[in-house]
Image (cartoon, coloured by chain):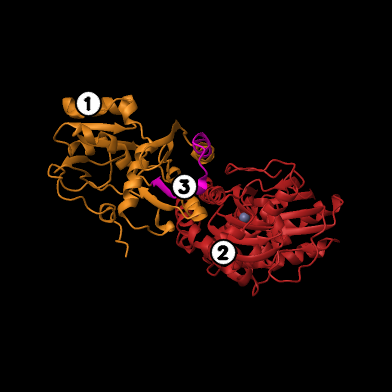
Chain colours: A red, B orange
């Protein structure tokens, strides 16, 4: 089964063609560089860019895959969670495309997309599927969710952030250190030359066992930087490394605990922050399970992950397929 | 067969038009639910007329001015349909659609839509030399500023609540005329007519070039007492760089 899939929940416009939920035939992502000037995402600007590029990318995705629309079996799009004005663009375009081409439309939960990114490959030799049940950590600029995947399409949320998303914390600290946007990759790069033990930072442990909280850490970094500024010089690499150590340990700690407390086969990562090598190592060190992480390009938002999730939605019916766009859509 | 889609404001409308007759039309108060309700309405129109979407070879969408998020619902849907079955796609201004049914009245006509806070979208239409045309740029302004451009009797159409009507009567006295409630509702049947006509004369642009008229900056400059010069291009009216 060949699925054309569209992702527009935030600031990346993604269109992909995926076969049988595992094999990527084309996967095009247009990142909206315009947000770098504002140091964050402006929803109205993001929605405009989605509408401008979506049809162009769809045409290109088909061309790159060497396929006609007539050779597609279903059309999928993210219907939430995300920015509602952005979701509406992708979902309505996809529904129009599906209806006019006589194809089924599949609404996909964005978080399921991040999970199923672990099923995707670009080459012929595709490894076996990740074994489930699994613990999944989805960490990005919009999400920090710890999820138990009991079976295909059966997800049990275990915990989430009670304030900022992990990626947001990276962004805010990067801005504080004048490193630019987005913060994740730049902090990881700068931190390589820093001492992660230079500054001890607090690790918040919310009462709910699997929830996260990053605002205390963020405030501590702010206070530290202001103090260092007063003394004259801010050792940017040391601050970045210390912050990265603290936040990745918080994430790794809870992920490992969730894996230990549930009878799972695998630990899966997803979301932009999952591309962070320090996080991967911190988790791998603490768990006795195999750890799977999509390659960095598939950790961030893209259409292929929506195509993979859509395939399993169609194969494991039972739960209703969402159609309407919802900014606060929850995992089933 | 032409499918017309309009989600410019809280009011949404869908119509099917075969070039001669409006075969089906649905107009409803969708509020913020246009995103959920558009496709069920399209499917109802197709079902009622036993039309397959594959036989729809033209799509007209309202492109504003209006609610940006709302406009993008119908425009994205129209783009998807055009990509899905190769239909020709055309964008028509929401204010053009509102004014169009009042052309036979020969009155100077001003469609009004809320633009948030105390701002309104407006434009002026009038017949001259037997040609009904928009005679002003698309405006975003307060009712006060809009009325300052008005010297003669003007017919107001569009989404005019009691408070707006009272304000216009205060500002203009007997010069303010109001279309009847049913005739000032925005209906996709008219969008379909305008879209059909446009596609007869205009060559098809790229699908991705159909997008909302992002009117924002106040664009009232100078007087509209002599508004009968040919209307400025939309690009110029909106202060946008001209598309090459
Ligand atoms: Zn994401």
Residue B176 figure quarter: top left
Bounds of the magenta segment: B43-62
Q: Is residue A258 magenta?
A: no
Residue B56 disc label = 3
Q: CA distance from mark 2 to mark 1?
A: 56 Å
* B109 left or right of A215 in image: left
Label 1 is found on which chain of the structure? Answer: B
Which residue is at 53% across, 49% downward?
A100
Q: CA distance from mark 3 to mark 2?
A: 23 Å
> How far across and down, in percent of the image, does residue A217 sit?
64, 55
Q: Is residue B40 visible?
A: yes
Which residue is at 71% across, 57% downward?
A116
> How far across and down, in percent of the image, does residue B70 sit?
44, 42
Same chain for the residues under marks 3 and 2 in the image: no
Name the residue nearer the viewer: A319 or B174.
A319
Q: Which residue has dot 2 on it?
A: A62
Q: Is residue A227 visible?
A: no
**Mark 3 / mark 1, whichever is N-terminal:** 3
Q: Nearer the viewer, mark 3 or mark 2?
A: 3
């Amino acid at each position: 089964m060949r699925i054309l899939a569209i992702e527009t929940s935030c600031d990346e416009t993604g269109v992909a063609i995926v076969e049988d939920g595992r094999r990527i035939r084309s996967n095009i992502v247009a990142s909206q560089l315009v947000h770098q000037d504002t140091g964050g995402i402006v929803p109205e600007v993001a929605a405009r860019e989605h509408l401008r590029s979506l049809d162009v990318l769809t045409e290109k995705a088909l061309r790159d895959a060497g396929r006609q629309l007539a050779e597609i079996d279903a059309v999928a799009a993210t219907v939430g969670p995300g920015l509602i004005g952005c979701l509406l663009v992708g979902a309505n375009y996809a529904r129009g495309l599906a209806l006019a081409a006589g194809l089924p439309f599949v609404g996909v939960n964005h978080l399921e997309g991040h999970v199923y990114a672990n099923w995707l490959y670009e080459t012929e030799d595709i490894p076996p599927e990740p074994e489930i049940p699994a613990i999944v950590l989805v960490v990005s600029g919009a999400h920090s969710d710890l999820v138990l995947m009991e079976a295909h399409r059966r997800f049990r949320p275990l915990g989430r952030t009670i304030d900022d998303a992990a990626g947001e914390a990276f962004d805010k600290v990067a801005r504080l250190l004048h490193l630019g946007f987005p913060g994740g990759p730049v902090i990881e790069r700068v931190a390589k030359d820093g001492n992660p033990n230079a500054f001890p930072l607090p690790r918040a442990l919310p009462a709910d066992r699997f929830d996260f909280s990053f605002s205390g850490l963020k405030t501590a970094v702010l206070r530290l930087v202001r103090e260092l500024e007063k003394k004259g010089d801010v050792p940017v690499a040391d601050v970045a490394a210390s912050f990265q150590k603290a936040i990745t340990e918080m994430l790794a700690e809870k992920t490992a605990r969730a894996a230990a407390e549930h009878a799972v086969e695998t630990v899966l990562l997803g979301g932009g922050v999952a591309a962070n090598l320090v996080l991967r190592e911190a988790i791998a060190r603490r768990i006795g399970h195999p750890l799977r992480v999509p390659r960095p390009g598939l950790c961030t938002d893209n259409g292929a992950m929506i195509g993979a999730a859509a395939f399993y939605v169609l194969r494991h019916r039972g739960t209703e397929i969402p159609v309407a766009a919802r900014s606060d859509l929850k995992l089933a | 067969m032409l499918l017309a889609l309009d989600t410019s404001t809280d009011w949404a409308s869908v119509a099917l038009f075969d070039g001669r007759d409006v075969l089906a039309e649905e107009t409803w108060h969708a509020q913020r639910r246009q995103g959920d309700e558009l496709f069920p309405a399209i499917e109802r129109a197709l079902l009622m007329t036993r039309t397959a979407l594959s036989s729809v070879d033209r799509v007209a969408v309202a492109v504003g001015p209006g609610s940006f998020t709302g406009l993008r619902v119908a425009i994205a849907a129209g783009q998807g349909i055009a990509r899905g079955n190769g239909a020709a796609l055309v964008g028509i201004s929401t204010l053009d659609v509102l004014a169009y049914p009042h052309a036979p009245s020969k009155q100077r006509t001003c469609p009004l839509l809320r633009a948030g806070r105390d701002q309104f979208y407006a434009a002026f239409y009038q017949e001259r030399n037997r040609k009904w045309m928009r005679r002003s740029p698309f405006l975003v302004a307060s009712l006060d500023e809009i009325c300052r451009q008005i010297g003669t009797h003007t017919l107001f159409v569009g989404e005019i609540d009691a408070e707006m009507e009272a304000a216009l009567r205060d500002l203009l006295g007997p010069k303010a005329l109001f279309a009847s409630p049913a005739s000032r509702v925005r209906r996709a049947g008219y969008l379909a007519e305008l879209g059909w006509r446009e596609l007869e004369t205009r060559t098809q642009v790229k699908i991705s070039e159909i997008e909302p008229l992002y009117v924002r900056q106040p664009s009232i400059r100078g007087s509209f007492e002599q508004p009968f010069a040919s209307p400025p291009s939309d690009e110029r009216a909106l202060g946008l760089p001209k598309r090459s």
